[in-house]
């Protein structure tokens, strides 16, 4: 049951994100006077629709996208040019004719192609930027309301001795090793440190900083144990410990060795839990997500080749492989139904919200790819048109006709076929060679 709830939460989140994306296109289009004949969530057969004013609002059977039909998307073309023949020319002309047929007599000025270039940009960028805004809101809700996984002041481990900084993870203590200060002071796994050297401790970073700067001087430590406060005295030892960066990762030198420096050391390790943070960390998280998404888009062709080789061959599928709708649904189900010690309801909710937020980042970035039928393709058309008009204005020439974006329809159909093929490949791969995350 929990698995289905997770999938349902994801489906609803995606549908709402798609619906709001299309609102981002529709609202400015109507504001600028463009007639919007349809607002649809999904593709295929219509399950439900109602007409309000001059717009039909509806839901279609296949929840893999949505659209708003803006009247007059494509201009009629340059009448001064001779008509071309051939299948491609017929395809382009049919797109122009279909666009022209939607315009009511006397409402030619309400056609999308008559908008200025800046207004076209606002309309076409409205959808992707709504997805970016959704991601910002969801990330903020998670980091402020739930928190992100990070170290806490509750101890997970207490070392029995002081090991070298480069000791392997499975190293054990020997009779000649120095007793670790935490063990000598009687600290135990499960203790929550609330004070160190007379200072209240609210986070692991604060505690680590206090330990590092105390050096070899004795310090009082107050812990919560079994609902009671216990005070003890601990004397950190000064030892060479690994240097970490701002992200908490160990720093290595050019030779591949761990960088160390002398600092206070107790011999304790933190538990990992949701730690609430300030909203000021959200821009950095958004930037990191955008950077990772951009890398995926740039390397998408090779990634799809790898997926195909895994799906149709004997190769293992990479854990960082791109996934489709089936894979994402599987992730949501596994997150909602996983049975792992310490993995409570708040973590499940936070992770599901983070998935929806990440999908909105992907929708934002993917829609900005400068190819029709994606929003980025229309953005390129508007920029080209605006550039031509600006050059004509500088040269004192007549205002150029709207950019004939219908000429890009063959490319748009090609991109659509590629996207459909990509979706089918990922669905197949997610079924025969799924990626497990829990």
Image (cartoon, helix red, strand yellow):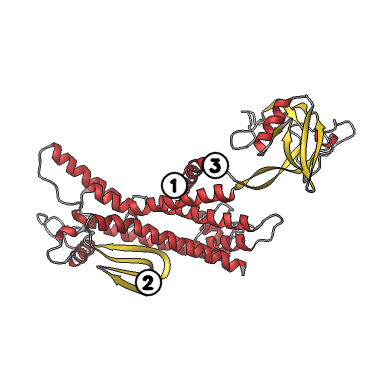
Can residue 342 be seen in the rendering of this structure? Answer: yes
User: Quarter-wise, where is residue 435 in the image?
Assistant: bottom right
Label 2 with label 3: CB-CB less than 8 Å: no
Give the left or right position of residue 245, taking residue 137 as reference.
right
Q: Position of residue 9 (x, y in %)?
A: 53, 64
Specify the quadrant of the image occupied by residue 200. top right
The residues bearing labels 2 and 3 have C-alpha atoms spaced at a distance of: 43 Å
54 with respect to 106 (left or right)? right
Nearer to us of marks 2 and 1 is: 2
Q: CA distance from mark 3 to mark 1?
A: 32 Å
Residue 338, image x, y percentages = 65, 61
In the displayed structure, would residue 231 be above or below residue 318? above
Callout 3: SS: loop
Q: How many marks?
A: 3
| Circle 3 crowding by C-alpha within 10 Å: few under 14, some 14–19, many from 20 | few
Q: Secondary structure at mark 2?
A: strand
Q: Nearer the viewer, mark 3 or mark 1?
A: 3
Q: Residue furthest right?
A: 175
Q: Is residue 28 or residue 322 the one in the foreground?
A: 28
Q: Which mark is residue 44?
A: 2
- Mark 2 packing: few (<14 Cα in 10 Å), some, or many (20+)? few
Tell me what residue is drawn at x 49 percent, y 62 percent: 325
Crowding around mark 1 (Cα neighbors within 10 Å: few <14, some 14 to 19, many 20+) is: few
Q: Residue at x 31, y 53 (%)?
A: 124
Disc 2/disc 1 C-alpha distance (Å): 30 Å
Q: Is residue 408 left or right of residue 279?
A: left
Q: Mark on residue 298?
A: 1
Q: Where is mark 3, residue-wise?
A: 278
């Amino acid at each position: 049951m929990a698995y289905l709830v997770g999938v349902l939460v994801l489906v609803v989140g995606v549908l709402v994100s798609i619906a709001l994306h299309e609102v981002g296109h529709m609202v400015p289009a109507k504001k600028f006077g463009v007639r919007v004949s349809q607002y649809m969530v999904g593709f295929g057969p219509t399950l439900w629709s109602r007409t309000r004013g001059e717009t039909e609002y509806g839901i279609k059977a296949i929840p893999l996208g949505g659209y708003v039909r803006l009247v007059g998307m494509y201009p009629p073309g340059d009448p001064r040019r001779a008509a071309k023949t051939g299948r491609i020319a017929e395809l382009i002309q049919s797109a122009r004719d279909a666009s022209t047929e939607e315009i009511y007599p006397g409402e030619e000025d309400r056609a999308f192609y008559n908008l200025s270039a800046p207004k076209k940009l606002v309309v076409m960028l409205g959808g992707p930027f709504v997805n970016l805004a959704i991601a910002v809101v969801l990330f903020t809700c998670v980091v402020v309301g739930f928190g992100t996984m990070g170290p806490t002041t509750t101890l997970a481990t207490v070392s029995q001795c002081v090991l070298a900084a480069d000791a392997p993870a499975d190293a054990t203590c020997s009779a000649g090793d120095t007793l670790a200060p935490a063990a000598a002071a009687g600290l135990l796994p499960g203790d929550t440190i609330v004070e160190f050297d007379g200072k209240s401790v609210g986070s692991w970073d604060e505690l680590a900083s206090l330990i590092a700067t105390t050096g070899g001087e004795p310090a009082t430590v107050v812990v919560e144990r079994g609902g009671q406060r216990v005070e003890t005295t601990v004397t950190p030892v000064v030892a060479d410990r690994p240097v970490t960066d701002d992200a908490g990762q160990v720093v290595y030198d050019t030779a591949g060795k761990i960088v160390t420096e002398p600092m206070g050391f107790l011999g304790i390790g933190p538990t990992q839990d949701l730690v609430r943070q300030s909203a000021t960390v959200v821009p950095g998280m958004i930037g990191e997500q955008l950077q990772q998404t951009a890398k995926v888009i740039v390397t998408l062709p090779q990634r799809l080749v790898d997926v195909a080789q895994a799906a149709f061959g004997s190769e293992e599928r990479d854990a960082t492989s791109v996934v489709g709708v089936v894979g994402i649904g599987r992730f949501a189900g596994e997150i909602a139904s996983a049975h792992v010690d310490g993995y409570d309801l708040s973590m499940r909710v936070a992770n599901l919200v983070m998935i929806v937020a990440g999908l909105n980042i992907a929708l934002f970035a993917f829609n900005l790819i400068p190819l029709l039928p994606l929003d980025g393709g229309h953005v390129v058309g508007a920029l080209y048109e605006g550039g031509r008009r600006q050059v004509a204005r500088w040269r004192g020439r007549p205002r150029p006709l709207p950019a004939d974006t219908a000429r890009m329809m063959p490319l748009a159909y090609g991109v659509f076929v590629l996207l459909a093929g990509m979706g089918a490949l990922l669905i197949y791969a997610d079924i025969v060679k799924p990626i497990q995350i829990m």
